[in-house]
Image (spheres, rainbow, N blue to C red):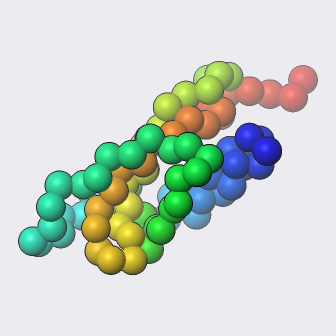
Amino acid sequence: MKALLVMALSSLCATAALADEAPTELAGQNAPIVEDYTYSTHLDVAKVLSMSSIPEVCEVVPVKMEYEDSQGQRHILNYHVMGNGCSNG
């Protein structure tokens, strides 16, 4: 189950890589809500604003994604992914 979640978040990361790396300033918005991902976290991602790059290491690393939900509220999501430095042989 955890592997599927990591794969789903990694897929979301790959899709979001097309988004701008710099956070978008939203006029009139409050400070972003900072959340740590858990399996019960409900994600309402309307637009990815920025994402951490995933380092070339073979270990689990913390990353962040800043996004806007369907109500226009900014969020910063902290979660963990496997680094890109592992090989299969």
- Residue 56 in sight here: no
Please state the horizontal and vertical placement of residue 60, each as a whole percent of the image.
62, 26
Q: Quadrant of residue 27?
A: bottom left
Left or right of residue 32: residue 19: right
Please state the horizontal and vertical placement of residue 30, each as a whole percent of the image.
15, 61
Left or right of residue 30: residue 33: right
- Residue 64 in sight here: yes
Quadrant, the N terminus: top right
Left or right of residue 37: residue 23: left
Please state the horizontal and vertical placement of residue 15, each as a whole percent of the image.
58, 63
Please state the horizontal and vertical placement of residue 75, each as a whole percent of the image.
33, 56
Which residue is rendered at x = 87% and y = 29% of the image? 88
Q: Quadrant of residue 78?
A: top left
Q: Is residue 59 above or below residue 21?
A: above
Left or right of residue 39: residue 64: left
Which residue is rendered at x = 51% and y = 44% of the image? 37
Q: Is residue 86 above or below residue 65?
A: above
